[in-house]
Image: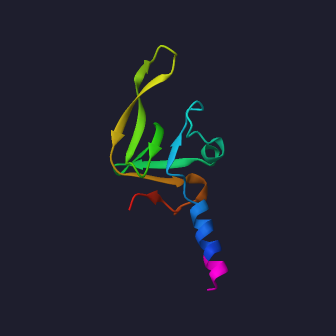
Amino acid sequence: MTEETTNQAAGSSAADTPPDHVSVNPRNAKFDAEVLQRGIGIRFKGRVRTDIEEYSISEGWVRVQAGKTVDRKGQPLTIKLTGPVEAWYEDLGENPPVAKKD
């Protein structure tokens, strides 16, 4: 392989893995609508979760809503859970590249 094709292959695989830190709350600085529209799958401690509000792969944590409790501004209260986090884009089919902490 030439150097150019190697860089293109590396760039496409990096584009196929989700970012390290994403939030579903539009008020958060880590909110990214384009990334969320693709659909991100999250595996936390070996279990696929659909209730994740925010995650960080490198720091090894997720935020989930704490029941139906809301703060005084009407925003859901969240709790931070620590453990191994893996993320992938759901629109890439059966065996998508998975972003995880090495």
Rendered residue at 43%/57% (across/down) = 100
Residue 42 in sight = yes
Residue 50 in sight = no
Rendered residue at 49%/51% (across/down) = 20
Rendered residue at 61%/54% (across/down) = 91
In percent of width and height, residue 4 lies at: 66, 79
Q: Quadrant of residue 69?
A: top left
Where 71 sits versus 60, above or below? Answer: above
Rendered residue at 39%/48% (across/down) = 59
Looking at the rendered structure, the number of numbered marks drawn on it comes to: 0
Q: Quadrant of residue 12?
A: bottom right
Quadrant holding the C terminus = bottom left
Q: Residue furthest top?
A: 72
Stretch of the chain drawn in magenta:
1-6
In percent of width and height, residue 65 lies at: 43, 29
Please check the rendered image and state whether residue 66 is part of the magenta-colored stretch, yes or no.
no
